[in-house]
Image (cartoon, rainbow, N blue to C red):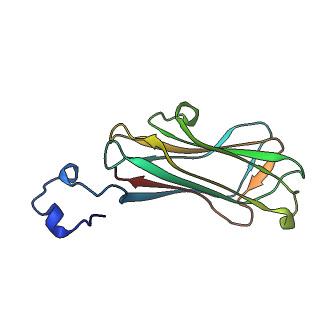
Amino acid sequence: MSTLSVDTIQGQTTAANVKFPAGAIVQTLQFTAGEQTISAGSGTTVINGTFNPKFSGSKFIVSAFIPNCTATSGGSVIVQCRLGTNSSPNSNTLIFDVQERMEGTGADDTRGINGHDFGTFTSSGTGTHYAGLVLTPDNNTVVARHSSTVRLIVQEVAQ
């Protein structure tokens, strides 16, 4: 394992000239959303944030946390995360697709939904990219109940 030190970057005039060791996290981004009700059957974009990769060719660690979800018992929610350069989430690379069964609509019936991935997406440049989180429930669903926060975390990893 190599270590990035001041000596390594001394004399470099731009970030593009600095080389990070493979596996180094070069930036961490967090996108958030608050409590909301999502209609049954619709693919609702809960988060669609923008970012610029520091380096072309980077891979990404992506994690989503959707807390305190409620819906009709036995129903389910599909969560898709996508990264790419298109402002429309469904036109970007599918990073993960997870589904969670719901327990009911009461405050004691909340469920959390989590999704994680590494390496599915590789940046092709350093221009504007989008991180999207789309939820599709089969019943009306409330997410992030009780002032909770939906979080989508994107970490760029040097290659």
From the viewer's perspective, tell me whether residue 157 is left or right of residue 7: right
Residue shown at 36%/36% (left/top)? 124
* Residue extending farthest front: 1
From the viewer's perspective, tell me whether residue 148 is left or right of residue 17: right
Q: Position of residue 136 (x, y in %)?
A: 73, 41
* Count of residue discs: 0
Vertical placement of 53 versus 94: above or below? below
Of residues 96 and 46, the one nearer the viewer is: 96
Quarter placement of the N terminus: bottom left
Q: Quadrant of residue 148?
A: bottom right
Of residues 134 and 57, the one nearer the viewer is: 57
Residue shown at 81%/46% (left/top)? 76
Vertical placement of 146 versus 142: above or below? below
Residue shown at 87%/57% (left/top)? 103
Q: Position of residue 150 (x, y in %)?
A: 63, 58
Q: Position of residue 142 (x, y in %)?
A: 77, 54
Of residues 37 and 66, the one nearer the viewer is: 66
* Residue extending farthest left: 11
Q: Position of residue 31 (x, y in %)?
A: 52, 55
Residue shown at 74%/66% (left/top)? 146
